[in-house]
Image (spheres, helix red, strand yellow):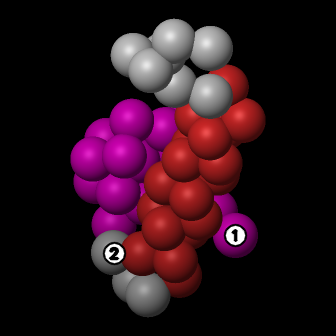
Amino acid sequence: MSPGIANPQQGGDWLVEQRYRAVLEGLDGSPVAEVAWRYGVSRQSVYG
């Protein structure tokens, strides 16, 4: 693998981490639509 290309598994882990953080913010009371917009995910994925 060339050094400029990310490992696909690492990319998937990053995505899971971002969605996890978005869910935590939603559970902490942040507006779901705002959290979803900031993280680039659907509103449905922010609901825990």
Q: Secondary structure at mark 2?
A: loop
Q: Secondary structure at mark 1?
A: loop
The crowding category of the residue bearing disc 2, from other C-alpha atoms within 10 Å (few below 14, some 14 to 19, many at least 20), is few
- Residue at figure coordinates x 47%, y 62% from the top left: 22
Residue labelled with disc 2: 30
The crowding category of the residue bearing disc 1, from other C-alpha atoms within 10 Å (few below 14, some 14 to 19, many at least 20), is few
In this picture, which residue range is highlighted in magenta? 31-48
Which quarter shows the C terminus? bottom right
- Residue at figure coordinates x 72%, y 35% from the top left: 9
Image position of 28 with respect to 17: above or below: below
- Residue at figure coordinates x 39%, y 36% from the top left: 40
x%, y% of residue 12? Answer: 67, 37
Q: Which mark is residue 48?
A: 1
The amino acid marked with disc number 2 is Ser
Numbered marks: total = 2
Image position of 3 with respect to 38: above or below: above
Q: Residue 13 or 27: which is nearer the viewer?
A: 13
Q: Earlier in the sequence, mark 1 or mark 2?
A: 2
Q: Is residue 12 left or right of residue 24?
A: right
Q: Is residue 45 visible to the viewer in this orientation of the structure?
A: no
| Magenta stretch, main secondary structure class | helix
